[in-house]
Amino acid sequence: MDVEHPDGLNAVRQAVASLKDNKIRPALSNPAFEVWLLAHFEKTGTVFGDCDAVKERLGKHWKEHFHADYDKADARIYSRLANLTDEAMANAKWVREHHHSGRDVMGSNSSTEVDLLVGALRGT
């Protein structure tokens, strides 16, 4: 779930509370899911103004590694990134633990919890 914009934090907090009430834990990304994709290439806690700023940074890596423009609808995203998943998990965890001084993802632009979901799916 994307945090997207600081003005929407109240709505995100309400959604997260509702999910937790139903024993569902969301995997948040701030400001957007592309922070998780970016973690495959770099360890960064850079503050991004919006999703487009994350996509721009991701696009540079995408172009360098895959000789193509990043496209959110690309059916090959997983296959392109699969061999970089361990690095992404380590980078995302490091950013949460060291860069944001214990703040949650909602208050930590940029960060992601997708690694926690991937870890749970992997059984690690």
Image (cartoon, grey):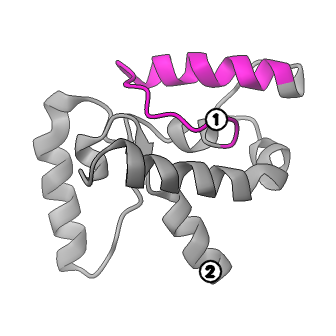
Q: Position of residue 78 (x, y in %)?
A: 76, 50
**Residue 74 or 41: which is nearer the viewer?**
41
Q: Which residue is disc 2 drawn over?
A: 124
Density class for disc 1 (Cα within 10 Å; few <14, some 14-19, many ≥20) is some
Name the residue furthest right: 67
Q: Position of residue 43 (x, y in %)?
A: 58, 38
Secondary structure type for disc 2: loop
Secondary structure type for disc 1: loop
Q: Position of residue 103 (x, y in %)?
A: 23, 50
Residue drawn at (44%, 34%) of the image: 45
Q: Find out whether residue 97 is within the magenta segment.
A: no
Amino acid type at image mark 1: Glu
Left or right placement of residue 22 versus residue 69 in this view: left
Q: CA distance from mark 2 to mark 1?
A: 22 Å
Residue drawn at (84%, 53%) of the image: 83
**Which stretch is magenta?**
40-64
Q: Which residue is disc 1 drawn over?
A: 42
Amino acid type at image mark 2: Thr
Which numbered disc, 2 or 1, marks the residue that appears first in the sequence?
1
